[in-house]
Amino acid sequence: MTDRPESGEVFGVPYNFERPSLGRMLSSYWQPGEGMLVPKPFGIGYTLNIASWRSWVVLAVVGGLLLQERSGDDLPAETEADDDGPVEVVVDD
């Protein structure tokens, strides 16, 4: 059986299947000076770089959307009051 590399890139997407250590996990999520996305410490693809302010903006937007979804305020009050019942639609051929 041939030895396969445990880390590298396939079609520009990084992968890493080496056994993760605590130091490598922490250092991969906090990389000042890098972009918003950094290679995952284990697995395939990218993850957020918490040292980047852009990541915090993404997390705040996602958190706000989750809060809005769970509160059930997805429709404004004026659109709910406009529902008068069934509407007849006439289509001419």
Image: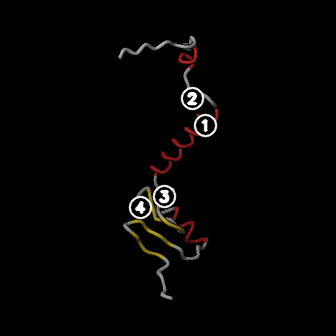
Q: Is residue 34 above or below residue 6?
A: above
Mark 3 and mark 2 in contact? Answer it, CB < 8 Å: no
Question: Quick one: label 3, few (<14), some, or many (20+) residues within 10 Å?
Answer: many
The mark closer to the camera, 3 or 2, is: 2
Q: CA distance from mark 3 to mark 1?
A: 23 Å
Question: Residue at point 48% right, 87% down?
Answer: 2
Mark 3 and mark 4 in contact? Answer it, CB < 8 Å: yes
Q: Amino acid at mark 2?
A: Asp
Q: Amino acid at mark 4?
A: Glu
Marks 4 and 1, the one that precedes in the sequence: 4
Residue on which disc 2 sits: 74
Question: Quick one: label 2, few (<14), some, or many (20+) residues within 10 Å?
Answer: few
Residue on which disc 4 sits: 34
The x and y percentages for residue 10 are 40, 70
The mark closer to the camera, 4 or 1, is: 1
Q: Which element is circle 3 on?
A: loop
Q: CA distance from mark 3 to mark 2?
A: 31 Å
Mark 4 and mark 1 in contact? Answer it, CB < 8 Å: no
Question: Residue at point 49% right, 46% down?
Answer: 58
